[in-house]
Image (spheres, rainbow, N blue to C red):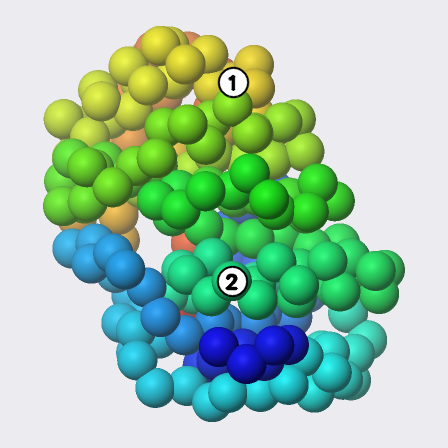
Amino acid sequence: MNANTLRITEIFYSLQGESRTLGLPTVFVRLTGCPLRCVYCDTEYAFHGGERRQLDDILKEVASYKPRYVCVTGGEPLAQPECHTLLSALCDAGYQVSLETSGALSVAQVDPRVSKVMDLKTPASGEVHRNLMDNIAFITAHDQIKFVLCDREDYDWARFQLDTHKLSEKAGEVLFSPSFGQLSATDLANWIVEDNLPVRFQMQLHKLLWNDAAGH
């Protein structure tokens, strides 16, 4: 990869549909490429293609929206090494920056000013073997851990990880989400309440508002 260039699928301004900043106007920078193939993926169009763009050009487009919040997403953003340069540059520009990452690649070098939203892959995702559990050591109260759950077995697995790794003590938020169209949101909400879990239930706001599978 050329220095200070990244392959970008799209840059757009919308409401954040997930995570701690749910509902807040946010610029999304979607990087191209992902080494995972989760069964429920809703951004397969970001696996290939995209446009190689200079870092300065990316920053200029982001600034044109005058945002407070910027989310770097994918694909898997960390699959491009220059993602780290982008994250730091966005922080330097004064934005509140989040990174949506699969947890399959190391987050050790992510700028500490960035809020990492790390998605631990469940058995039903088809990619549970890709979880890099060493990443948990780099999670702080500034960060978030997300589980996308497809069925009761996924829920029980996630609850075990929550207990075993004391995730609610490490991360600022632990997020449990139903996989859209696979797990009843009501069932998941009831399980969380019944078990009194220290997690935040969430649904994908963009899908409720716009029936938008791509995360806009």
- Give the x, y percent position of residue 209: 46, 66
Q: Please tell me which of labels 2 and 1 falls first in the chain.
A: 2
- Give the x, y percent position of residue 64: 78, 84
Q: In this view, does 205 lie above or below 147?
A: below
| SS under mark 1 | helix
Residue 140, quarter of the rendered image: top right
Visible residue check, residue 209: no
- Give the x, y percent position of residue 175: 45, 34
Mark 2 residue crowding within 10 angstroms, few (<14) / some (14–19) / many (20+): some
For label 2, the residue is 81
Disc 2 residue type?
Answer: Pro
Image-based side of 178 in relation to 6, left or right: left
Q: Nearer the viewer's eye, disc 2 or disc 1?
A: 2
Residue shown at 73%/58% (left/top)? 88
- Give the x, y percent position of residue 97: 69, 55
| SS under mark 2 | loop
Image-based side of 82 in relation to 158, left or right: right
Disc 1 residue type?
Answer: Ser
Residue shown at 61%/46% (left/top)? 110
Q: From this viewpoint, which residue is outermost toward the front?
A: 2
For label 1, the residue is 168
Q: In this view, does 131 lie above or below 65?
A: above
Visible residue check, residue 141: yes
Q: Is residue 97 above or below residue 200?
A: below
